[in-house]
Amino acid sequence: MPIGFQRVAERIWVKINIGVHTDIYCPMYSPKKLCGFENNYFQISSNKELAERIANYFSDPKTDFLWKLITNRQKMAPALRNTEMVVLRRLVGDFSNIKSTNQFNQEMAVDDTEVLKRVPLFQETVRWLEESFLGAGATKVEWGRIFFSKHFANSDIDTHTDEGKYFDYYDRFHFVIDQADHENIFHIRDEDVKLLQGNFYWVNNHVPHWLKNLSNKDRINLIVDARIL
């Protein structure tokens, strides 16, 4: 985990759960928890109204094509074969010779997509994400990739760990847009986690994790990679 966010993450957790800032440190790469306060995830903020507006946006069949514009993630990673994505910020460069996610995760250059530039609702969402980080105690936000992920109904995302130069720099956050609450399981390390619709979370993706959608409804969440200082 990036050292900068590791410490900010812990300060945010303490502020939210204890009500004060403090300087604490604990390694979070370990397959097992090493500290009493350590979580596999924690909630940063919530915005159910925004999540509902985004869910309504994607319920319009006219937006279905957005899920087909970029397909490399699910094609390169067998664990993610039951997903699609709509990308707001993406890696930029020549990826013609990249055949695996391990290679892909060494790339660092990121830029906004035309989708983000053309959809005011998505621009509003990114502004709200930044406000959430700053409101929770961060002083600076550096964006990595940002994309909506659709996890198909009655399907799994297999066990995987997000590794590489890219994930040594950025951490991962989830804003749950649309799902059948309590029928989606996000297993992180040693814990079954149930993230709830409308909430924004930090998750520890640097350790083994997998997901199950046990419902008859596709799950949509916004995946945000950011370096927080």
Image (cartoon, rainbow, N blue to C red):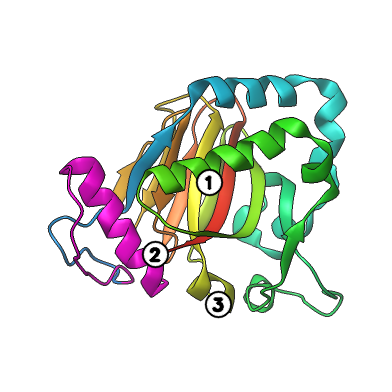
Q: Residues within 10 Å of mark 1 (few under 14, many from 20)?
A: some
- Numbered range of the magenta stretch: 1-29
Disc 2 residue type? Phe
SS at circle 3: loop
Which residue is labeled 2 in the image? 5
Measuring from the top left, give residue 22's x and y in whole percent.
18, 59
Q: In this view, does 181 lie above or below 168?
A: above
Observer-nearest of 171 and 101: 171
Residue at left offset 20%, top offset 53%: 21
Q: In which quarter of the image is residue 52?
A: top right
Q: In which quarter of the image is the C terminus?
A: bottom left
Residue at left offset 70%, top offset 73%: 100
For this view, does 159 lie left or right of residue 106?
left
SS at circle 1: helix
Which residue is labeled 1 in the image? 130
Of the two numbered discs 2 and 3 on the same chain, state the one appearing first in sequence: 2
Of the two numbered discs 1 and 2 on the same chain, state the one appearing first in sequence: 2
Which is in the foreground here, disc 3 or disc 1?
A: 1
Residue 24 lies within the magenta run? yes
Q: Is residue 11 above or below residue 20?
A: below
Q: What's the distance in space between the residues labelled 1 and 2, CA to CA?
A: 14 Å
Look at the image and tell me whether residue 214 can be seen. yes
Disc 1 residue type? Glu
Q: Quadrant of residue 182?
A: top left
Disc 3 residue type? Gly
